[in-house]
């Protein structure tokens, strides 16, 4: 999962570098923007985004509870 995230970030950086450095001009920029918007508005991508946000929220809750538990344990051990 982590490797996939890194791959996506590299692809996004490469796309951004191409857009900003392209000599193809405004028309190529518009093609790229249209393609990215089409991708982001795809129903499958939207479902995946919703699942990712839900998963992140659950992981955050779990990590917060665990950090709180460990904090209480450390405070109890100190004094």
Image (tube, helix red, strand yellow):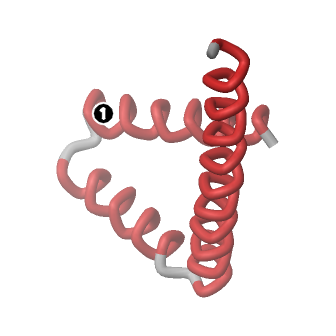
The image position of residue 63, as x and y in percent, is 67, 45
Quick one: 69 or 2, which is closer to the camera? Answer: 69
> Going 49% across and 71% down the picture, which residue do you hit?
40
Secondary structure beneath dot 1 equals loop
Q: Which residue lies under the disc numbered 1?
A: 22
Q: Residue at x 35, y 62 (%)?
A: 31
**Residue occupying the far bottom of the picture:** 43
Front-most of residues 67 and 46: 67
Rate crowding at label 1 as few (under 14), some (14 to 19) or many (20 or more) other CA atoms within 10 Å.
Answer: few
Question: Which residue is situated farthest in the front direction here?
Answer: 79
Question: Residue 19's x, y, as percent?
Answer: 32, 39
In the figure, 24 relative to 48: above or below?
A: above
The residue nearer to you, when weighing 51 against 60, is 60
Q: Quadrant of residue 46?
A: bottom right
What percent of the width, then of the height, locates residue 60?
A: 61, 52
* Residue for point 60% across, 86% down: 43
Q: Is residue 63 left or right of residue 31?
A: right
Q: Is residue 43 left or right of residue 28?
A: right
Quadrant of the frame with the C terminus: top right
Query: Considering only vertical position in the picture, is 3 above or below 60?
Result: above
Circle count: 1
Q: Residue furthest left?
A: 26
**70 displayed left or right of 71:** right
> Is 1 rendered above or below residue 40?
above
Residues 19 and 57: in front is 57
Q: Quadrant of residue 15?
A: top left
Q: Which quadrant is the N terminus positioned in?
A: top right
Taking 71 as reference, is 39 left or right?
left
Q: Which residue is pictured at 18% across the width and 52% down the height?
A: 26
- Residue 67 to residue 36: above or below: above
């Amino acid at each position: 999962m982590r490797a996939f995230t890194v791959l996506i970030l590299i692809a996004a950086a490469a796309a951004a570098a191409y857009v900003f450095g392209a000599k193809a001009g405004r028309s190529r920029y518009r093609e790229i923007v249209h393609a990215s918007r089409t991708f982001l508005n795809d129903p499958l991508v939207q479902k995946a985004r919703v699942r990712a946000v839900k998963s992140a929220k659950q992981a955050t809750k779990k990590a917060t509870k665990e950090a709180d538990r460990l904090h209480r344990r450390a405070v109890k051990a100190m004094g």
